[in-house]
Image (cartoon, helix red, strand yellow):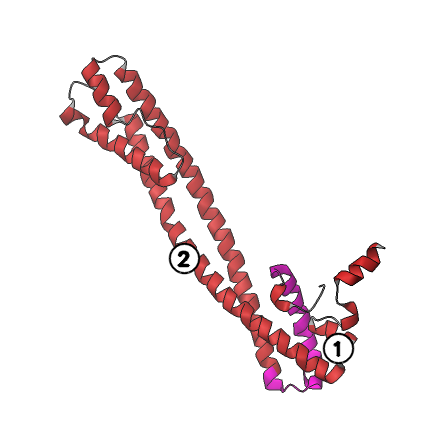
Amino acid sequence: MKNNAVTLDNSAQFDNRIHTFVNGISSHGIEIGYSEEEIVGMLDYVARYDELEGKQKVERADLKAVYAVIKEREGKTREHVYRCRHLVRGESVMVDDESKKYLAERFLLDKKVLKRRAELIAMAENMVEAYDGLSAEKPDILLPSVPFESLRTAIESLKTALIPASRERAEKKAIIVARRALRAEGNRILRSVYLRAVSFWGIDDSRLLKLGMLPKSMVWTSKKKKVEEE
């Protein structure tokens, strides 16, 4: 800690400050005029803070696992799209110009395989749809089914993996909102306790350290930095 500007703390700094505070308020709360009920309320806040921090860690791990699966299945889908394109291109070499044009347009052979997931899925689904319609539209062109069935399976596998991602993102957002509100509450508690403490002890008492705050003489300032550099 460099100062008592709680609202400027990053997450790690606030976490350190609030866990120092929890011991200090237990030891000195009565001393600075808080009732046991008020102290219990502050301790309850820290318990709620820790619980939410735990949930956020679990959520991060869950989301990371979900995206690892999505990445793997997206890669498989992309691979199968290329395999099917190779197959169709190989067939187009052997057919007449009209059929060649048909294959290029129907299977989007002149378009790049795009990086965005949604566009990849759309292209992959178009290829499967084109294959399914081939027997009716161009019965003279025969393509092996295995690459397209593999692509169909890969698409469904990827889309299945995306379902929990939506849920995890919603849960992540809810935790962020709750954490923001809880952080604001913690800022108010720490500021109020600090002002209460200095009214009893003064602004340069070492006991402030036990509440997660700094005595005035320990507060970092640009002037102190200049002296240290000299």
Task: From the viewer's perspective, tell me whether residue 199 is left or right of residue 106.
Answer: right
179 falls in the magenta region: no
Residue at x 21% of width, y 22% of height: 102
Query: In the rendered image, which quarter is residue 146 located in?
Result: top left
Q: Which residues are magenta?
A: 10-38
Seen at 15% across and 21% down, the residue is 139
Q: Which secondary structure, mark 2?
A: helix
Read off the residue under disc 2.
Answer: 170
Q: Main secondary structure of the magenta part?
A: helix
State the residue in front, 97 or 163: 97
Q: Residue 220's quadrant in the figure? A: bottom right
Q: Residues within 10 Å of mark 1 (few under 14, many from 20)?
A: some
Where residue 112 appears, x then y in whole percent?
36, 28
The crowd level at tag 2 (other Cα within 10 Å; few <14, some 14-19, many 20+) is few
**Where residue 100 sits: x, y (%)?**
23, 17
Pinpoint residue 130: horizontal percent, then vertical percent: 22, 29
Disc 2 from disc 1: Cα separation: 44 Å
Q: Is residue 15 above or below residue 160?
A: below
State the residue position of label 1: 203
